[in-house]
């Protein structure tokens, strides 16, 4: 099921449920507003939808209805309605039932994790809810704008994490290379010492031992023989 969150809007008016009809075809458009709730702001909202897509890669769809077709679970209804349109990746649906006093934010299944995160979906819903609750008259276009601004904020936060992640990975790789290099050098030194010891016949004789056996000790010279000392007259 698509991630979605339902909020009661406390609009102060709820009328008997009216069938809203199928939304499969209606949701193919960016804005579905048969009640003309956006009024003269529809062009502005469409421009914001385009800028949100360009900046974040998120497709925004707005659906304004009188009721959620009498559904007892608007959350599920909005999610299934969105999925039935086979939406592109990273699609967010803001569905508002003006007469029911309900608002739903649904995110498509094929969205990135940062977008369909439950906490982020909640933030989008709360952002859309604010302008509707303020004042005597709900600000429908302001609601849509607020949600899209929040999408941009969340996207900016997500993109700012990536450089830090790359730096962290780079540091780990560098440290790993250094450790491997140290291990290789130590092993090479250890191997060199073993080879030198083996080529020397195991035990290295001291200077005194060389003198005792008559072997050369310095540059092939034999140790001088000790003779009697003559005292000077």
Image (cartoon, rainbow, N blue to C red):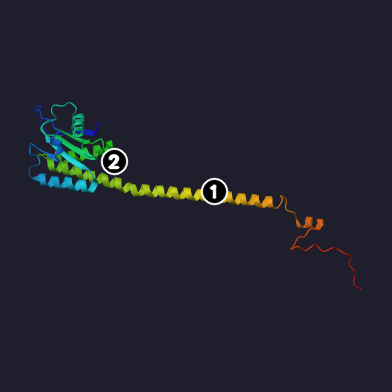
Mark 2: secondary structure: helix
Q: Position of residue 66 (x, y in %)?
A: 10, 32
Q: Quadrant of residue 4?
A: top left
Q: Position of residue 61 (x, y in %)?
A: 17, 39
In the rendered structure, which disc, 2 or 1, sits on the residue that comes first in sequence? 2
| Left or right of residue 118, residue 26 in this image | left
Quarter of the image where the N terminus is located: top left
Q: Nearer the viewer, mark 2 or mark 1?
A: 1
Label 2 with label 1: CB-CB less than 8 Å: no
Q: Position of residue 89 (x, y in %)?
A: 24, 40
Disc 1 crowd rating (10 Å Cα; few below 14, some 14-19, many 20+) is: few
In the image, what residue occupies the spot 24% across and 37% down?
121
Dot 1 corresponds to which residue?
A: 183
- The residue closer to the viewer here, 90 or 4, is 90
Q: Which mark is residue 114?
A: 2
In the image, what residue occupies the spot 22% across and 39% down?
88
- The residue closer to the viewer here, 212 or 152, is 212
Mark 1: secondary structure: helix
- The residue closer to the viewer here, 37 or 165, is 165
| Left or right of residue 27, residue 227 in this image | right
User: Distance of mark 2 from mark 1, alpha carbons?
Assistant: 40 Å
Disc 2 crowd rating (10 Å Cα; few below 14, some 14-19, many 20+) is: some
Does 80 appear above or below 164? above
Residue 78 visible in the current orientation? yes
Quarter of the image where the C terminus is located: bottom right
Question: In the displayed image of the protein, which residue is found farthest to the front?
Answer: 199
Q: Which mark is residue 80?
A: none
Q: Position of residue 201 (x, y in %)?
A: 72, 51
Residue 139 visible in the current orientation? no
Q: Quadrant of residue 142?
A: top left
């Amino acid at each position: 099921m698509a991630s979605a969150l339902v909020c009661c809007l406390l609009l102060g008016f709820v009328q008997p449920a009216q069938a809203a009809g199928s939304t499969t075809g209606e949701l193919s458009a960016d804005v579905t507003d048969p009640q003309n709730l956006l009024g003269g702001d529809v062009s502005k909202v469409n421009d914001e939808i385009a800028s949100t897509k360009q900046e974040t890669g998120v497709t925004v769809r707005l659906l304004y209805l009188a009721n959620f077709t009498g559904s007892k679970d608007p959350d599920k209804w909005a999610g299934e309605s969105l999925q039935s349109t086979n939406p592109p990746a990273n699609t967010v649906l803001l569905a508002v039932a003006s007469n029911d006093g309900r608002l739903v934010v649904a995110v498509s299944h094929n969205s990135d994790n940062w977008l369909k995160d439950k906490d982020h979906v909640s933030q989008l819903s709360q952002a859309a809810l604010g302008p509707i609750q303020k004042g005597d008259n709900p600000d429908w276009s302001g609601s849509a704008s607020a949600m899209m601004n929040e999408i941009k904020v969340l996207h900016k936060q997500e993109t700012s994490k990536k450089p830090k992640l790359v730096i962290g990975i780079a540091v780990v790789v560098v440290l790993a290379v250094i450790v491997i290099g140290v291990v290789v050098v130590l092993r090479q030194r250890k191997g060199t010492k073993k080879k030198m010891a083996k080529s020397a016949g195991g035990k290295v004789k001291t200077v005194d031992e060389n003198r005792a056996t008559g072997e050369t000790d310095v540059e092939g010279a034999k140790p001088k023989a000790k003779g009697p000392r003559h005292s000077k007259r």
